[in-house]
Amino acid sequence: MTKDLPKLQMYIDGTFVEHASGTYFESYDPFTGKPWCRVPRGTADDADRAARAAHRAFTTGAWPGLNASERGALLRNLAELVAENADDLARLEVRDNGKLFSEMVGQLRYAPSFYHYFAGLADKIEGSVVPTDKAAFTYTRHEPLGVCAAIVPWNSPLLLTAWKLAPALAAGNTVVVKPSEYTSASTLKFIELVERAGFPKGVVNVVTGFGPEAGQPLIDHPHVRKVSFTGSEKTGAGIYSDAARDIKRVSLELGGKSPNIVFADANLDNAVKGAVAGIFAASGQTCVAGSRLLVQESIHDAFVDRLVAFASRAKMGNPMNADTNVGPVTNMPQFEKVLAYIDIARNEGAKIALGGGKATRPECGDGWFVEPTIFTGVRNDMRIAQEEVFGPVLSVIPFRDDDDAVAIGNDVAFGLAAGVWTENMRRAITMANRLQAGTVWVNMYRAVSYTTPFGGYKKSGMGRELGQEAIREYLQTKSVWISMAESMDNPFVIG
Ligand code: NAI
Ligand code: MG
């Protein structure tokens, strides 16, 4: 371990702290392939300390006494601070996950809108007066759950943190954030802004470390009442089942194998760009990746030619450069996983139309780069069409007609997103109705907004982030009954 790299510190109960184990692990810069900072290796002791601090902050001190408008005001402070620091935070994220600066700075400049949106929503959570058949005045309140664990992956660390933190805090919960072991640095910088925004101590805590060592104890902790997780299907399934022991609330966003469907009547220039946006943006490391490109048979060959021509012009290299299109893959295990899937596809009989391995271009240096890869001749029952790769690897699958597109599109275990490219409005709406996906884009791809619910069908997850629905995931309903009767009836039977 290189001793002179900067050391990060966890943040618990309103202060940066020494962690229990005293040991660190290295975080790598995917562009250089070298370690650049040391991250505290958290354990159950740190998770326990953070969960207790969050529980104290939920039950005592200033936070539970704030009204919803005051919580909203703190979130607006945070939004302003994130806006002021967006470029610095984006640079940190690029260092740690290798995604393009242009993408990360876009995310960080957009993140304040998510805090503003939920700041505005905080004091618009209205219960109702319920007309009841009993001699009582009855109303409902929507109350926070308590301590929420936010388990975040590496692909968009601070944006995905905002998706969880903003509604959780607007609703009045307290939070322990566990960033990915590959990308903890930006979260530990961001937490300084949370402190400056004026949140009381213990309301937001950050525990770093590996999933099984630092994340699992949060899932198992008796004070944690809700887990909000984004990541792999396997880890998500484990969290769902472990959280069941204490009947914790869970929301899961688990990625997919989304179909991006191009009809012969589409605007093909836009469809080519949409296919590229679906799989080569962010080097394919997005949960909504349009990793199955379904192309209508009559245009299949011509469309693939145009796509290959466009994608082959993508520039690879330093993700900080404004003209780079495709950066490295974020971590070594992911790099190896993507390359392994390329071999799997080859062995299954898929044909390489572009790329097909590690990038050896000089501008890629020692970084973890995979060539933008396009497979044709893919059948939907192949592993390359069924399993999430999370890299720049596209499977092209031909289809006959609308029914065939729907059948192939839906024939996977996942259901996060889908794209449809057509100039026919009836077809667009019919396809949007028939595709089993939490998001369907027509003549666009990979758009998200704080206003619009986002989440999975089938194995892509449960619960919704963003939009007004999201805050419900962090609230529970209480019914209050106040008797209007002069005297009580028979106490031995239900009233
Ligand atoms: P992962 O699902 O194991 O990790 C995601 C987060 O969960 C990280 O913060 C990790 O430390 C934490 N975690 C892991 N095990 C845990 C446990 N037992 N208890 C609590 N927290 C735990 O994903 P990983 O290893 O980073 O990537 C593997 C695959 O996951 C990728 O190849 C990709 O297919 C998928 N993935 C999907 C994402 C999405 O946006 N849906 C994002 C990142 C990865
Ligand atoms: Mg890193």
Image: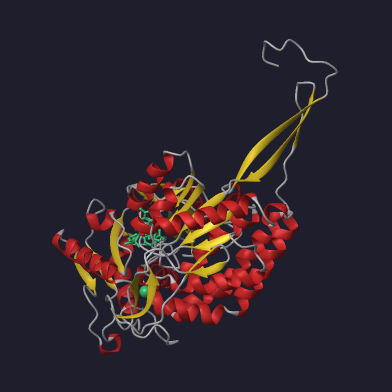
- Total numbered labels placed on residues in the image: 0
Q: Give the image's coloring scheme.
A: secondary structure
Task: Say which of 44 and 462 sits in front.
Answer: 44
Q: Nearer the viewer, residue 125 or 144?
A: 144
**Do we see residue 285 in this rendering?**
yes
**Image location (x, y in percent) of residue 335:** 27, 70
Q: Quadrant of residue 389?
A: bottom left
- Could you say which is closer to the camera, residue 454 or residue 66? 66
Quick one: 308 or 245, which is closer to the camera?
245
Query: How far across and how far down the image is residue 124, in percent?
Result: 72, 52
Query: Which residue is situated farthest in the right direction here?
Result: 486
The quarter of the image that holds ligand 2 is bottom left
Left or right of 394, for residue 46: right
- Residue at x-position 35% and y-position 62%: 210
* Image x and y of residue 201, in percent: 61, 62
Left or right: where 76 falls relative to 47: right
- In the figure, 193 relative to 412: above or below? below
Which residue is found at the position 49% from the left and 70% from the top?
187
The answer to whether residue 453 is seen in the rendering is no
Query: Measured along the vertical axis of the image, is residue 226 above or below residue 267?
Result: above
Tell me: 228 left or right of 334.
Answer: right
Q: Identify the residue shown where x is 63% and y is 49%.
A: 59
Name, please, the residue furthest toward the bottom. 362
Which quarter of the rendering shows the C terminus? top right
The quadrant in which residue 451 appears is bottom right
Q: Quadrant of the N terminus?
A: bottom left
Q: Quadrant of residue 489?
A: top right
At which x and y percent is residue 192?
57, 73
